[in-house]
Amino acid sequence: MLDYIIVGSGLAGIAFAEKVLQNDKSLLIIDNQSQNSSRIAGGLYNPVILKRFSEVWQAQEQLQLLDEFYQALELKLNIKVDYKIPILRKFFSIEEQNNWFSASDNKNLAPFLSLDLLSTKYKGIQSPFDYGEVLHTGYVDTATLLDSYKEYLIKTNLILKETFDYNALIIQSDYIEYKNVKAKHIIFAEGFGMHSNPFFNDLPLDGTKGELFIIKAPDLDLDVIINTSVFILPIGDHLFKVGATYNWKDKTNTPTEEGKSELLSRINEIIDCKFEIIEHFAGVRPTVRDRKPLVGTHPNHERIHILNGLGTRGVMLAPSMAKALFESIENKKPLDNEIDIQRFNKRS
């Protein structure tokens, strides 16, 4: 009998799988690769919500676990995915500068916001009001990570590539069974695909569609991430990932002209050099109305669990949320009320 079946192999599924394996437990992952939000994500990690100048929930703990998690994966898979790179907030006015300094007076934000404005001139960007630097930032190459981890799962026979059939799940008192595979627990880490899950589809998971570009800009000289109304992330060879839009109505993975127009407008507010669009892609992020993840155990089935709702901060949240769920299951450690699915109305 296995210890765990994990449904989904995005960032949440991988993070939980690694927690299982690090504790010498057995697992099988089931995934049909239908969800792509982890793959196309910008992959940025940033302890500050720049739009509102507020601290990311449990930022210090998340950053520590993030470092440990991705370093271990780099060693395990012999890849490079974690890039420590500054995130700079481009200022458009003196007022924005003043807001930055006011935010840096907040004791929770002080460790993450540099007090020294940067006047570096980057070719292709006009910046008369300079930049503010966010500390302890970077990005994870999620596509490389997911591809390499999938190869690892295939080589070790730990993945079943199929669409999960909920009707085939048999629930017993001391185990669950799926197509003759028995396990002590099952973890659903399906992203936006959770809406098809009869055990958890009453939870308030929304989807925010994000559209991104890969652009080529030979005259843009940038070795940092610029973050304003969109982010511009250098990925080498004069290529840059740019994103993202937020659409709460469209739940498809299809790029749109509306998204394209919005991104083009925002890019042109930041850079003043020519560029071409190399790729335009889209995905639906699993987001929750209170901006907190969905973690926990089904109220009526103690062997059925969920790890979802990581939203726009999956790179940062995945390691810490996987740890919290694993310790909840194995050690009966209570989940934080802010992430526990029991914060929503009790279900019959």
Image (cartoon, helix red, strand yellow):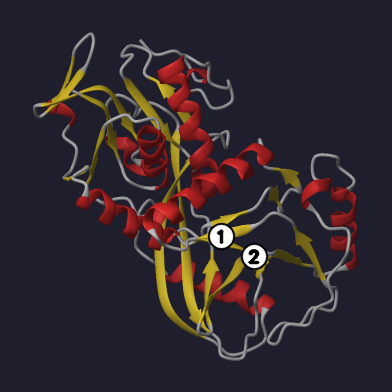
Residue 285 location (% of width, % of height): 44, 49
Identify the residue at horizontal 50%, vertical 20% (top origin): 344
Between residues 141 and 257, which one lies in front from this camera angle? 141
Between residues 257 and 23, which one lies in front from this camera angle? 23
Establish if 243 lies above or below 137. Answer: below
Residue 236 location (% of width, % of height): 52, 79
- Image quadrant assignment for residue 279: bottom left
- Image quadrant assignment for residue 265: bottom right
Identify the residue at horizontal 33%, vertical 58% (top origin): 148
Residue lying farthest to the left in this orientation: 180
Q: Is residue 30 left or right of residue 188?
A: left
Identify the residue at horizontal 54%, vertical 62% (top origin): 244
Kindly identify the amino acid type of the residue bearing the numbered disc 1.
Tyr
Residue 92 location (% of width, % of height): 80, 70
Q: Is residue 107 left or right of residue 190?
A: right
Identify the residue at horizontal 36%, vertical 18% (top origin): 298
The secondary structure type at the circle numbered 2 is: loop
Kindly identify the amino acid type of the residue bearing the numbered disc 2.
Ile
Precedes in sequence: disc 2 or disc 1: 2
Establish if 179 lies above or below 233. Answer: above
Picture quarter with the C terminus: top left
The secondary structure type at the circle numbered 1 is: strand
Give the residue at mark 1.
139
Q: How many marks?
A: 2
Q: Are marks 2 and 1 in contact (CB under 8 Å)?
A: yes
Residue 272 in view = yes
Picture quarter with the N terminus: top left
- Image quadrant assignment for residue 273: bottom right
Say which mark, if any, is on residue 85.
2
Residue 306 location (% of width, % of height): 38, 29
Q: CA distance from mark 2 to mark 1?
A: 7 Å
